[in-house]
DNA sequence: CTCATTCATTTGTATATACAAACATTAAAA
DNA sequence: TTTTAATGTTTGTATATACAAATGAATGAG
């Protein structure tokens, strides 16, 4: 059944979740070649772009809870993709050389993801949708 | 930080997930008085509207995997809100009298949820957004 | 200076969802 | 008619995320 065909097709809860799950799936496919889940990938991208970012800042960037950020970092640390340094109560997260080497491939995955969804839903619609969702998310 | 302010604010993966989490949170609040999570509530609503629905059909309506439906039903069964009957390889899910009694309150919760988000984001925008998300979800 | 408060991070635990495999049943093919 | 394939459901297990509490460090009021 299609999302729009469901008896809940006009409900914000239902549609936003359904869409997010489908997008998540596409993103997972795109990042699979690097062995990263989308959220790990996005966190790592952020740290590559701005080395030393702290968990609280990452929580803001990724709109996730700090505890979730800790969990993501732990896994990236196991994979030797980031390293944490602690000073006082603050923690800084840095990309490792291995992560830096990976950077171009990560950009390619991101591009691939973008290209794929634009191919499916169209550039104008997707740009508009992202903007609207972002605006509504900000209000909630 | 706001969703739109993030370095990922223009990414479909990021915004659709951020939005879904915020909507989920609002929905949880609305359904909390009945002790139901939104997904349990929606499944139960479907079964109240159409008693005897089967897991596969519910999976279609709710856009969730059959295994997830099984898990949701199990919990609703524990709470004596639905009952399963099995004939051959098919399963039918029926609401209990307890669930039927609850129906008006559930409709009120649903209304409350709708009223709240419309109050926050506006009727026109939310209607438009739901329609767009639904359309894009169908294509993915 | 010290103690209470606040802040950043982590830990323990819980929920939501999925995937893959296992069953059980029906349908199709030989 | 027996075997094979397809279908609907459930089970085992894994991932993503969150909340609440614990920890450790900085700050400010007295």
Image (cartoon, coloured by chain):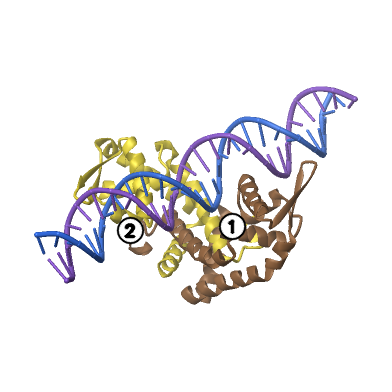
Chain colours: A brown, B yellow, C purple, D blue
Quick one: label 1, few (<14), some, or many (20+) residues within 10 Å? Answer: some
> In the picture shown, does residue A24 fall above or below B99?
below
Mark 2 is surrounded, within 10 Å at the Cα level, by few (under 14), some (14 to 19) or many (20 or more) other residues, namely some
Instruction: Give the left or right position of residue B12, taking residue B70 as reference.
Output: right
Judging from the image, what secondary structure is the residue with disc 1 in? helix
Distance between the alpha carbons at the discs numbered 1 and 2: 27 Å
Percent coordinates x, y for residue A113 in the rendering: 55, 70
Q: Chain of mark 1?
A: A
Q: Nearer the viewer, mark 1 or mark 2?
A: 1
Left or right placement of residue A33 versus residue B129 in this view: right
Tell me which residue sits at (38%, 50%) in the image: B68
B104 vs B139, nearest the viewer: B139
Residue at left offset 22%, top offset 51%: B90
Q: State the quadrant of the C terminus of chain B.
A: bottom left
Is residue A63 among the parts visible in the rendering?
A: yes
The residue pinned by badge 1 equals A39
Dot 2: element: helix
Q: Nearer the viewer, residue B22 or C20?
A: C20
Horizontal and vertical percent position of residue B39: 40, 48
Q: Is residue A18 above or below residue C12?
A: below
Q: Return the chain for callout 2.
A: B
The dot on residue B60 is 2
């Amino acid at each position: 059944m299609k999302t729009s065909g469901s008896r809940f097709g006009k409900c914000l809860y239902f549609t936003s979740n359904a869409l997010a799950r489908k997008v998540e799936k596409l993103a997972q496919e795109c990042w699979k070649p690097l062995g990263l889940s989308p959220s790990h990938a996005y966190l790592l991208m952020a740290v590559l772009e701005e080395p030393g970012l702290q968990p609280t800042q990452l929580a803001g960037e990724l709109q996730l809870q700090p505890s979730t950020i800790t969990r993501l970092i732990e896994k990236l640390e196991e994979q030797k993709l980031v390293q944490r340094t602690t000073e006082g109560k603050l923690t800084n997260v840095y990309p490792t050389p291995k992560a830096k080497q990976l950077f171009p491939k990560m950009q390619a995955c991101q591009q691939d993801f973008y290209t794929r969804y634009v191919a499916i839903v169209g550039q104008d619609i997707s740009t508009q949708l992202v903007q609207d969702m972002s605006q509504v998310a900000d209000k909630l």
